[in-house]
Amino acid sequence: MEDAVTVAPRFASVGTAPYDFFGVYDGHCGVSVAWACRDRLHVVLAEKVAALGEWPTAEEQWREVMATSFSRVDGELALKEREVGSTASVAVVGPERIVVANCGDSRAVLSRGDMAVPLSSDHKADRPDERKRVEAAGGVVINWDVYRVSGVLATSRSIGTTSPWTPDS
């Protein structure tokens, strides 16, 4: 099994409102990146929020905090993990909001009554916008019954894996 989870109640000491962190990581080609995400992503996110001095209130602030936290963890792993990677789906739950972010094809849904409400969008090579992004970066998307980046991964984004089309790989 190449998966990992994080449950971190009251994960950051900012203000008085309690926020909890939940993360699910789906590793590929090994477990090391999923484990690193399990151990680091909520810590990095807490540091980012602490540097702001308060919890973000606007969607764009949350988007920036999440994106830079994901990028920082990916950067920490970039030189160590070139073939091992992980997708991620995380949620920060506070008294008045739920903030969700994902990387790859790990998705978040909210159960409301008997309905599943999607909270994230998969980053998959079969999406026209993702295929265009991959190709613009010099990559190739191949359809072998399933669209795959360089014929390997169906997910078009991940933490850790150095993209097969990067010049230095």
Image (cartoon, helix red, strand yellow):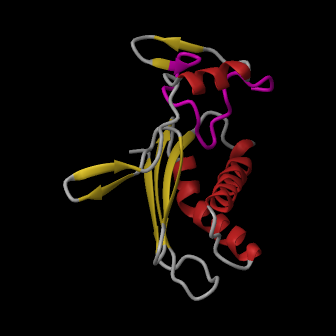
Outermost residue to the right: 168
Vertical order, 160 against 168 (above or below): below
Outermost residue to the bottom: 16
Relative placement, left or right, of 1 versus 8 is: left
The front one of 123 and 149 is 123
Which of the image's four quarters has the N terminus? top left
Which of the image's four quarters has the C terminus? top right
Vertical order, 47 against 29 (above or below): below
Q: Quadrant of residue 43?
A: bottom right
Q: Residue at x 73, y 18 (%)?
A: 138
Q: Residue at x 55, y 21 (%)?
A: 128
Horizontal and vertical percent position of residue 147 = 48, 18
Say whether residue 168 is magenta: yes
Say whether residue 153 is magenta: yes
Q: Main secondary structure of the magenta part?
A: loop
Relative placement, left or right, of 121 versus 44 is: left
Vertical order, 66 against 107 (above or below): below
Horizontal and vertical percent position of residue 53 = 73, 79
Residue range of the region highlighted in magenta in the rendering: 148-169
Outermost residue to the left: 114
Horizontal and vertical percent position of residue 47 = 70, 71
Horizontal and vertical percent position of residue 137 = 73, 23
The front one of 29 and 68 is 68
Q: Residue at x 59, y 35 (%)?
A: 157
